[in-house]
């Protein structure tokens, strides 16, 4: 696959997950859930915009400006530093629709991350740096969605650890 083809495929992934978040925002009744899906949808839209811009730049100039790719989603380290506040902000009771939407979002985010991981191994130069940045951002999305889903399911898992394990330290 050449740079144009792989970016076009990336665009399809980004549009798919953006559309999912927009649909979830419209169908979820919970205010917090709407906010989560709106934030993630907006971040995905910024990826769509960046990829469209990159395709145009690649065609016109043969290069891509990776500095244009940014995200409002915090890193795992930033999430960990605010974990208690984050935990207290999540309502104790979440509706089933949110759980289903979060589970679907997690699946889509993991698929998108897997695509970017593979794209990183098959590209070089500017295009590889773009995919590395997109992978980092999508992995942040996975973390955020996983945290929300863990809490919504009340299964004793929080932030990929059993909550009892956290108390032992």
Image (cartoon, helix red, strand yellow):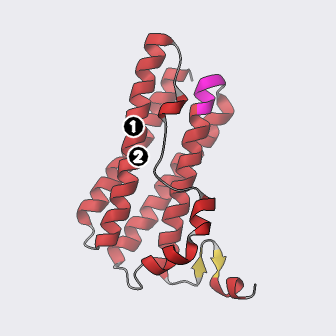
Lateral position of residue 118 relative to residue 61, left or right: right
* Towards the viewer: 60 or 2: 60
Q: Which residue bears the numbered disc 2? A: 44
Q: Which residue bears the numbered disc 1? A: 48
Lateral position of residue 52 relative to residue 137, left or right: left
Helix, strand or loop at disc 2?
helix
Percent coordinates x, y for residue 156 in the rendering: 58, 84
Percent coordinates x, y for residue 1 in the rendering: 57, 24
Percent coordinates x, y for residue 125 in the rendering: 65, 23
Percent coordinates x, y for residue 122 in the rendering: 66, 30
Residue under the point 34% across and 53% down: 20
Instruction: Name the quadrant containing residue 77.
Output: bottom right
Residue under the point 58% across and 56% down: 75
Quadrant where the C terminus lies? bottom right
Q: Disc 1 vs disc 2: Cβ atoms closer than 8 Å?
A: yes
Disc 1 versus disc 2: distance between alpha carbons?
A: 6 Å
Q: Is residue 109 magenta?
A: no
Residue under the point 55% across and 55% down: 140
Instruction: Name the quadrant containing residue 105.
Output: bottom left
Q: Is residue 60 visible?
A: yes
């Amino acid at each position: 696959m050449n740079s144009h083809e792989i970016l076009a495929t990336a665009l399809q992934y980004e549009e798919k997950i953006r559309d999912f978040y927009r649909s979830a925002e419209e169908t979820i009744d919970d205010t917090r859930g709407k906010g989560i899906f709106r934030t993630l949808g907006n971040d995905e839209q910024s990826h769509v915009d960046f990829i469209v811009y990159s395709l145009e730049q690649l065609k016109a100039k043969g290069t891509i400006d990776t500095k244009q790719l940014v995200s409002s989603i915090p890193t795992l380290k930033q999430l960990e530093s605010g974990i208690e506040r984050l935990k207290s902000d999540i309502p104790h009771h979440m509706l089933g629709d949110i759980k289903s939407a979060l589970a679907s979002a997690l699946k889509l985010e993991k698929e998108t991350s897997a695509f970017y991981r593979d794209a990183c191994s098959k590209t070089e130069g500017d295009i590889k740096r773009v995919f590395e940045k997109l992978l980092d951002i999508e992995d942040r999305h996975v973390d955020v969605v996983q945290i929300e889903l863990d809490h919504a399911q009340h299964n004793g898992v929080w932030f990929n650890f059993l909550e009892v394990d956290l108390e032992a330290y």
